[in-house]
């Protein structure tokens, strides 16, 4: 039964991490819906499964990551104008990460969202907010490609990522919405959103190492956490590939309907 619990939670984290429905919000929902999770450290589990999701996204975007690294350091060494667009793109990823990074430290240090994280009704409300924004941008196609992204675009998308720190707000959903508001093409917005996820996720994993080292976990529980991480890896990989197809086809309305239904059900029936 314990193994099934951790497989189930790894699945929830993995499949909801890349799609715009909030992985943290769904973990809170299932805590309320399903009995028997009281003995699980959800904060630690989220850190470990997040690492599995990170690995999946790095593998999916490995070609883009390699190209950007090569161009960044290549431009530093040669000042070749052909590499400048990718060099600039790398800096925009860094700058777009800063707002959420700073706010994340503040939120963690002062426990700003402790009350909200315990209020399942708030998750229902934020799912409805997500549905509204996804509906607004459902028909957006955009005109900007990677080379057309500006500093202002990057910073605004970065501030959308700050909003995703609220429990129940999807990070991928918020940043893709931000990108589309800035007239980025669907593919461009998707790629920027997921490349933006990588530095934030790396920082989260590094900060989580301290908690992992301090946690008193027996060898059996460590195995369960690793199983959960592997399941999260598999389903984040599948979910990201699927979500990219949905975004490129302009079918975000599916997630609008889903968030509306789940949001209303949470508000009406969970407490």
Image (cartoon, rainbow, N blue to C red):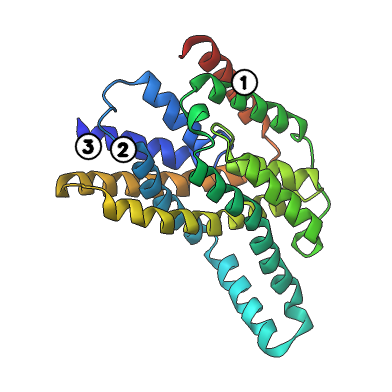
From the viewer's perspective, is residue 270 above or below residue 185?
above
In the depicted view, which residue is nearer to us: 90 or 258? 90
Residue that mark 3 sits on? 3
Would residue 261 be found to the left or right of residue 178 on screen?
left
Report the residue at 79% width, 39% height from top: 140
Question: Which label belongs to residue 260?
Answer: 1
Q: Could you tell which of marks 1 and 2 lies nearer the N-terminus?
A: 2
Q: Are marks 3 and 1 in contact (CB under 8 Å)?
A: no
Element assignment for label 2: loop
Would residue 12 be found to the left or right of residue 25 on screen?
left
Residue farthest top in this picture: 268
Residue 207 coordinates in the image, percent (x, y)? 42, 55
* Residue 195 can be seen in this image: yes
Q: Are marks 1 and 2 in contact (CB under 8 Å)?
A: no
User: Disc 2 versus disc 3: distance between alpha carbons?
Assistant: 15 Å
Residue 186 coordinates in the image, percent (x, y)? 72, 47
Circle 2 Cα neighbour tier, 10 Å, few/some/many (<14 / 14–19 / ≥20) = few
Viewport quadrant of the C terminus: top left
Q: Could you tell which of marks 3 and 1 lies nearer the N-terminus?
A: 3
Callout in the foreground (1, 2): 2
Residue 166 coordinates in the image, percent (x, y)? 58, 35
User: Disc 1 versus disc 2: distance between alpha carbons?
Assistant: 29 Å
Q: Could you tell which of marks 2 and 3 lies nearer the N-terminus?
A: 3
Question: Which label belongs to residue 41?
Answer: 2
Circle 1 Cα neighbour tier, 10 Å, few/some/many (<14 / 14–19 / ≥20) = some
Residue 212 coordinates in the image, percent (x, y)? 31, 52
In the depicted view, which residue is nearer to us: 114 or 225? 114
Report the residue at 71% width, 49% height from top: 157
Element assignment for label 1: helix
Callout in the foreground (2, 3): 2
């Amino acid at each position: 039964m314990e193994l099934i619990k951790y497989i189930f939670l790894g699945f929830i984290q993995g499949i909801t991490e890349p799609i715009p429905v909030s992985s943290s919000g769904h973990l809170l929902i299932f805590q309320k819906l399903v009995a028997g999770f009281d003995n699980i450290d959800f904060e630690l589990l989220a850190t470990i499964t997040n690492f599995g999701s990170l690995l999946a996204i790095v593998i999916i975007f490995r070609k883009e990551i390699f190209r950007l690294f090569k161009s960044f350091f290549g431009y530093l060494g040669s000042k070749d104008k052909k590499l400048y667009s990718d060099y600039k793109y790398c800096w925009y990823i860094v700058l777009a990460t800063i707002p959420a990074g700073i706010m994340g430290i503040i939120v963690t240090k002062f426990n700003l969202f402790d009350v909200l994280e315990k209020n399942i009704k708030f998750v229902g409300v934020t799912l409805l907010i997500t549905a509204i924004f996804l509906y607004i941008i459902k028909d957006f196609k955009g005109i900007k490609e990677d080379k057309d992204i500006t500093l202002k675009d990057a910073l605004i998308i970065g501030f959308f990522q700050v909003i995703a720190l609220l429990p129940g707000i999807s990070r991928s959903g918020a940043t893709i919405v931000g990108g589309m508001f800035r007239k980025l093409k669907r593919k461009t917005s998707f790629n920027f959103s997921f490349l933006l996820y990588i530095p934030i996720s790396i920082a989260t994993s590094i900060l989580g190492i301290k908690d992992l080292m301090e946690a008193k976990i027996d060898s059996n529980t460590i195995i369960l956490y690793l199983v959960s991480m592997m399941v999260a890896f598999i389903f984040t990989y599948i979910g990201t590939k699927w979500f990219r197809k949905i975004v490129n086809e302009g079918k975000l309305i599916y997630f609008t309907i889903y968030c509306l239904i789940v949001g209303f059900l949470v508000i009406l029936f969970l407490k």
